[in-house]
Amino acid sequence: MSVQIAQSIPLVMTTAEVAEILRCSTTTIDRYVFAHELLAIQIGRERRFRAIDVLEFVSTRPNTIRAKKPRQSGPKRT
């Protein structure tokens, strides 16, 4: 992660802000928290995310780019 990106996000973020940064829903963020994949801190009744934890989460995610399956050559249809 470049320093420029790290400096452009707030030190502490809400669930909605993290969802916007990761381009997913707040429900997905909740799933990551409940699965202990994304760390959150509790402040009163609210959940907050530290920028360092969000950056760590992103950097440890596996790459999911999949190669296309080769087409199987079978009998040609006429």
Image (tube, helix red, strand yellow):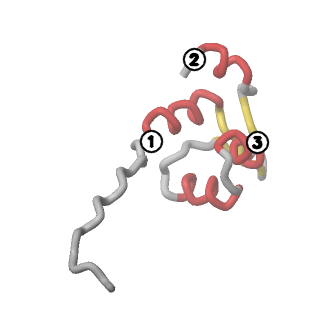
Image-based side of 23 in relation to 33, left or right: right
Which amino acid, by three-letter code, is at mark 2?
Ser
**What residue is shown at x 52% (from left), y 37% (from top)?**
58
| Residue 22 position within the rendered picture, expressed as x and y whole percent measured from the top left | 64, 43
Whether residue 23 is situated above or below residue 10 in the rendered picture: below
Q: CA distance from mark 2 to mark 3?
A: 19 Å
Residue found at the far front of this picture: 78
Residue at the spot of label 2 = 2
| Residue 6 position within the rendered picture, expressed as x and y whole percent measured from the top left | 64, 21
Residue at the spot of label 3 = 17
Which amino acid, by three-letter code, is at mark 1?
Arg
Q: Which mark is residue 11?
A: none
Residue neighbourhood size for the residue with mark 2, other residues' Cα within 10 Å, grouped as few (<14), some (14–19), many (≥20):
few
Q: How many marks?
A: 3
The C terminus: image quadrant:
bottom left
In which quadrant of the rendered view does residue 50 lie? top right
The N terminus: image quadrant:
top right
Question: Tag 1 or tag 2, which sits nearer the N-term?
Answer: 2
| 39 or 9, nearer to the observer | 9
Whether residue 5 is situated above or below residue 28 in the rendered picture: above
Residue neighbourhood size for the residue with mark 1, other residues' Cα within 10 Å, grouped as few (<14), some (14–19), many (≥20):
few
Residue at the spot of label 1 = 61
Q: CA distance from mark 3 to mark 1?
A: 19 Å
Which amino acid, by three-letter code, is at mark 3?
Glu
Secondary structure at badge 3 equals helix
| 14 or 68, nearer to the observer | 68
| Residue 71 position within the rendered picture, expressed as x and y whole percent measured from the top left | 29, 64
Of badges 2 and 3, nearer the viewer stands 2
Image-based side of 58 in relation to 76, left or right: right
Secondary structure at badge 2 equals loop
